[in-house]
Amino acid sequence: MRIRYRPNFTVQLTTGAAAFLGVLAVTNFTVPGGVQWVGAVLIGFSGFLVGGYRVRKTIRNVYLLVGHPNSDATFCSAVANAYEQGAREQGYTVVRQDLARLDFDPILHKGYEEKQELEPDLKRVQENIKWADHIVLIYPNWWATMPALLKGMFDRIWLPGFAFRFNMFSWRMLLKGRTGRVIITLDNHPWMAFLLFGDFTNEIQSVLFEFAGIRPTDISTFGSLKFRSHKSKQRLLTKAYRMGRRAL
């Protein structure tokens, strides 16, 4: 088990507010007003910081999925190579699959009205996700979302009984006990993309991974690739290598 800091504004704000209000309530009749408010603010801020820490289970098995539909050498592949090298050198067991080498039909021809039998490659993806302690997905941002082939893969495999199960009022997360890392490459700057087009990470992080219990799922954006020098890109690969060594 490891303690690590993972910013989450909603959780931290809730923790900080609860600590602030709790101190005010407890000290209401025992501490002078000015001291009371200063103490409440300090304790509330401490609660805000503490709320960002998470307990992380021990990781041994890492599943690395490269979500680029091109089988040629791409920057996504280079990032995956660096991450894989770092993880293996540190002793983690790594299973890697490349989307471009998977053989499957990405189209749900009948939607979810009829069962569409999974191809062997898709079954292996599911098996690897179940096997893994930590799941790493690397893909390029195209038009503020994932490539169509990657979306088609999730349409096919993210099914009731595998990733989740609905009940009367909620759902069961069937992939609990795993953590995730999503690395997104994009030509422009991440903040510029966010300001112009909105959040381009939510459907993977929240709607797929964390919805199924893969928590926490952290996001890394490797942006401005179109304008980076070779040396600058190498620094990103070094970052991916270091992430692999820590299985982040």
Image: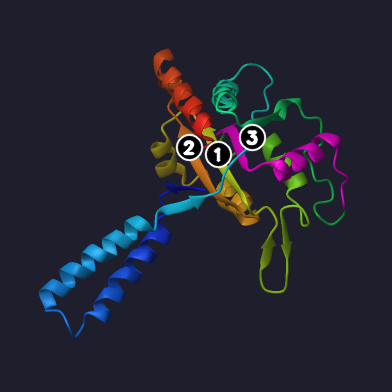
**Numbered disc 1: secondary structure:** strand
**Mark 2 neighbour class, 10 Å CA radius: few under 14, some 14 to 19, many 20 or more:** some
Q: In the drawing, what numbered circle is on residue 220?
A: 2
Q: Which residue is the site of mark 1?
A: 182
Instruction: Give the answer, above or below, for where 123 lies relative to 35.
Output: above
The amino acid beneath tag 1 is Val
Q: Residue 91, located in which quarter of the rendered image?
A: top right
Q: In the drawing, what numbered circle is on residue 103?
A: none
Q: In the drawing, what numbered circle is on residue 147?
A: 3
Q: Residue 232, located in which quarter of the rendered image?
A: top left
Q: Position of residue 180 (x, y in %)?
A: 58, 43
Going from the N terminus, do you reach mark 1 or mark 3 first? 3
Q: Residue at x 54, y 25 (%)?
A: 86
Instruction: Give the answer, above or below, for where 167 lies relative to 45.
Output: below
Marks 2/1: CA–CA distance: 6 Å
Would residue 213 be found to the left or right of residue 118 on screen? left
Q: Which residues are magenta?
A: 115-141
**Mark 3 neighbour class, 10 Å CA radius: few under 14, some 14 to 19, many 20 or more:** some
Q: Residue at x 47, y 35 (%)?
A: 221
Q: Position of residue 9 (x, y in %)?
A: 39, 56
